[in-house]
Amino acid sequence: MKTIAVLTSGGDAPGMNAAVRAVVRTACENGIKVYGVVRGYNGLIKGDLIEMDLRSVSDIINRGGTILYSARSKEFATEEGMKKAIDTCKKFGIEGVVVIGGDGSFRGARDLSERGIPCVGLPGTIDNDIACCDHTIGYDTCLNTIMEMIDRLRDTAESHDRCSVVEVMGRRAGWLALNSGIACGATSILIPEVPFDIERDVIQRMRKTMLTDKKHFIIVVAEGCEINVHDLAKEIEEKTGVESRATVLGHTQRGGYPTARDRVMATKMGNYAVKLLMNNIGNRVVAAQKEDVVDYDIFEALNMTKTIDMNLYNIAHEVSI
């Protein structure tokens, strides 16, 4: 291939810039022209592309967000939008595209691949919900951000003998809630993958720990549980007598400097993706398996289901009393 493009799509994730940098520099070092697509598939439809070189990605490896910006595109899901994107690729001579994003972004990559534009997807999402990938780009950073913020909440909860109910992101997946809950010693962790009962899994657990003279508590709730954490805090206070406060961490979880783990993994994935395209291999998803980088057929990857680690979930409840 002589010319490729790279885009970021869907929700931003720390480490996306490190992946973009790796794609651009690997391409340049191998004599391949590379375009950055601005604002995801919308940019591909509108022809909003910038030619990138070695220096265009200097000093971005440490930055959160994405220098290419991101957007969700309803138009791209239509045949007319798809045709416009393909016309853009033909206009700029683009023979392959690296797509950095989540499963929705991968569906777009699959559709482009089916229409003759080879694509390679890189899993960039804080939710860690890509089934073929142990750790998606951005997950580790987000997890550490949550841990830091809950640690701060713990300080004030301990000072006032309070219960702090914390809602964390993750969309329909409970990975962020489970691992941050373990890392912060939460008394109770509610995730969408495991059926829960507020009385049994929150109130009774708190009462049990109160018998051992514990006076402050952390309850972590995944947003996918679809619970109003402010109502939950009121219920906890009414039933236990422990003053309770709710905190929704929100989009603060998305930003910030990526961790070393995310920077290194994103770099390995970006390099790997370009090497696939150099060998005219598309319709693939790059994934992290332990510390290795592998690739899957994009159809296979989209059809895989990621299940929660029940052993980890059981450990969390054994050690949180």
Image (cartoon, helix red, strand yellow):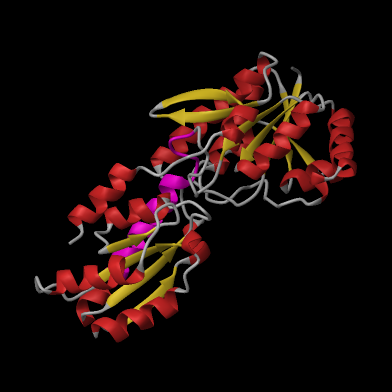
Q: Position of residue 120 (x, y in %)?
A: 65, 28
Q: Position of residue 22 (x, y in %)?
A: 57, 31
At 61% across and 42% down in the image, what residue appears? 103
Image-quadrant location for residue 41: top right
* In the image, residue 151 lies in the stretch drawn in magenta: yes
* 133 sits to left or right of 17: left
Q: Position of residue 204 (x, y in %)?
A: 23, 71
* In the image, residue 172 lies in the stretch drawn in magenta: no
Considering only vertical position in the picture, is 262 above or below 196?
Answer: above
Can you say which quadrant of the picture contains the C terminus?
bottom left
- Provide the residue span drawn in magenta: 133-154
At 31% across and 86% down in the image, what residue appears? 238
Magenta: main secondary structure? helix
At 53% across and 50% down in the image, what residue appears? 64
Task: Kindly give the residue lying farthest to the top in the view shown.
Answer: 279
Could you tell me how many numbered marks the image carries?
0
* 213 sits to left or right of 64: left
